[in-house]
Amino acid sequence: MKTNLSRNDAVEKTIALTLTLSPEAPEERERFYSALDLQRDGERDPAGGNASLAPWERAGVRGPKAPTAWTRLSPNSTTPLATFESKAFCGFKIQRFIASILLSFTAVLAHLPGTATAAESNSTQAVTLKHLEGRKRQQIAASQRMSSFNKFGFEDRLAGSGITFQHQIVDDAGKTYKAAHYDHGNGLATADVDGDGLLDIYFTTQLGSNQLWRNLGTGKFELFPDGSLSLSNQISVSASFADIDNDGDPDLFVTTVRKGNHLFENLGGGRFKEITEAAAVNYRGHSSGIVFFDYDNDGLLDIFLVNVGVYTSNEQGAGGYFLALNDAFDGHLHPDRTEFSLLYKNLGGNRFREVSKELAFREGSWSGDASFVDLNRDNYPDLYVLNMQGDNHYYENQGGKGFVDKTAAYFPKTSWGAMGIKFFDFNQDGNQDLYVTDMHSDMTKPQTEKGLNFRLDLEKGKSEAFCAVQWSEEYLQGSSNNIFGNSFYQNLGSGKFRETSQDLGLETYWPWGVSVGDLNADGFEDVFVTAGMGYPFRYAVNSVLLNEQGKEFFDAEFLLGVEPRRNQRTEKTWFTLDCDGADKNHPECNGKSGVQKIAGALTSRSSAIFDLDNDGDLDIVTNELNDNPQMLFSNLSERKKIRFIKIKLAGSQSNRDGLGATVSVRSGLKTLTQYHDGKSGYLAQSSMPLYFGLGNSEKIESIEILWPSGKNQFLKDGINLNQTLVIREP
């Protein structure tokens, strides 16, 4: 007998969760209800049968009188078979309750005639894989109207790459799970740190050590022997590479949670020296993303440091991390927890000065990330700052002398729970469009319950109806100017944007970050979105969104082999408990003894798209939460003849990386445009060449670069395809 927790049987009015038995035996429903006797507050309900649910119904699940415990009794005795403990029944904490009840239901079913436990016949992984198979069939059917090339795929070759990095979480993202910001995970960044022409990878983690892996070519990597970047148990968050001293090699900034941020100067050959104190960027707080950009166009890269807000206490847990506040996700309602983001001006000589106050630039959103762009084309980069619980903010640069909030003029409605960001020209009209992913709008109790069966229509739809039920206007802090889901702003030119995420197929479920690249080399950039929550939530898919010639995006993660994961993995042991010892009071030890391995769903956080093995096509790397990375190698170059060019910029009057430059490649009838922002994925900025897929074009007519300095540079004739072209600013 298969059993499954289903959205259809979450009795939304009063009961948090019930159980659905498989369609093969619908008569077992009443059998289950009749067998499930409930005890409240130590007194057995005398009514029996279905009436035994009545006290739960009367109490409800959201009110202050909700039951604190329920017990299933053995027939004709007072021996409890399973206990359901009521935690928080609203907001983000409902998931922990769901996980506890799911395990408890398994214990009940073991004593019901004609049923089998999940361990015996229907593991969580098996149920998930069945849902994923259904999703694959849907995607194959939908692909019949897709014209973009999709006859290629990805293979996770982690074992063959040599990379052994393992992301490690703090207990508040696992064993003592709290609805707090630790489950937001970590970034990864890429750069050629040793100057050999190959992109290396830096992975960050919470516990354990960050690791820098040297690219040996052909998809092989080795760990750099220099351990100066390891930052052991520093509770790292993000990583960004950029050349702060214009010496031709990428330097590195790493943020942490209250352990102090770290700036490293690249000494060449893959050797680094920490210069945090001397550079005066030694802030300690709840830091998150980093943006390198030259806000005043003096040729030196400045730093925008994104701070979330206070979400921890002063008490420390295993590994030295600061324990999360129990109401961490109410932080936006507490002005005293505001932690302003910081703007550091590069003074030269590897020295910085914090200038937010002198520029009257005070950004206090609950933000995890940000990016920059030049929408008004004045050669001064503007900032877009996300807000994970409220309004995003777009700040227009005032000639390097300050920033003015112009959000309402450009983006009158923004994603309420924004998490990931990327500017790119999706339809190659020469204008930068904006894609923002929204995680937190998907995190209501009703939507989580309804999403247990992997319904595609729910995952591809907005969350406004659920949010309106779950949260008050006070909690939302006014919702009239918000979108509850991902947002995509199509740039119509002249400062006008149209929000088109639903029309273009860009809604996803539980998304984190965005990586963009031309995966099929047809001249239109595609999108990879990391997703999922991990323990104690169900599995969620990462999305590959293939760009259909700038008209719409198609879901293609199953077509291209990104889903399901290698070896059909959907879960792993998240943590281990000693139910006879120190962990005996843990909710997961209820009814259990001995050592218990607790499973959690696999989930990705950050990603980067670049050519891992130098075969001309783009591959994907992820940083997982509490697991090894995925190293997704593309076989596009084996399936078709591809044409491309990689462009590496070298500024002279502009910053050496050329960040803030606009590059246009004219090939055949197309002009392909990219704005060089280095934004490679969630919580990351990378130093890597721009990749232009050329489709069927056999020739590049011209390349134009508009440098941050204002110089225009043209290259014509004799530009070879399928090369990395270094372009130096004249």
Image (tube, rainbow, N blue to C red):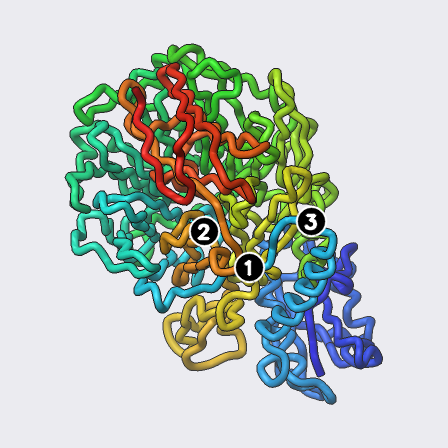
Which comes before the other along the chain, label 1 or label 3? 1
The residue indicated by pointer 3 is: 460
Relative placement, left or right, of 457 versus 429 is right
Residue contact at pointers 1 and 2, CB within 8 angstroms: yes
In the rendered image, which quarter is residue 138 located in?
A: bottom right
Which residue sits at x=82%, y=73%?
Answer: 50
The answer to whether residue 540 shows anywhere in this view is no
Local packing at callout 2 (Cα closer than 10 Å; few below 14, some 14-19, many 20+) is many
Up-down relation of residue 19 to residue 207 (above or below): below
Instruction: Tell me the amino acid under the disc marked 2.
Output: Asp
Q: Tell me the SS state at disc 3.
A: loop
Question: Compared to 724, does 591 lie above or below?
Answer: below
Q: Residues within 10 Å of mark 3 (few under 14, many from 20)?
A: some
Identify the mark nearer the N-term, 3 or 2: 3
Q: Secondary structure at mark 2?
A: loop
Q: Quadrant of residue 247?
A: top left
Question: Residue at position x 50%, y 41% from top?
Answer: 698
Depth check: 707 or 177 in front? 707
Q: Estimate the x, y position of residue 299 in percent, counting from the top left.
A: 29, 19
Residue bearing the label numbered 2: 617
Query: From mark 1 to mark 2, how far is it between C-alphas?
Result: 11 Å
Tag on residue 595?
none
Q: Position of residue 398 (x, y in %)?
A: 44, 11
Find the distance from the CA under tag 3 to the CA under tag 2. Answer: 29 Å
Q: Residues within 10 Å of mark 1 (few under 14, many from 20)?
A: some
Q: Residue furthest front?
A: 718
- Residue underneath mark 1: 152
Q: Which is more toward the observer, 193 or 715?
A: 715
Q: Residue at x 64, y 50 (%)?
A: 90
Q: Is residue 482 visible?
A: yes
Label 1 SS? loop
Q: Earlier in the sequence, mark 1 or mark 2?
A: 1
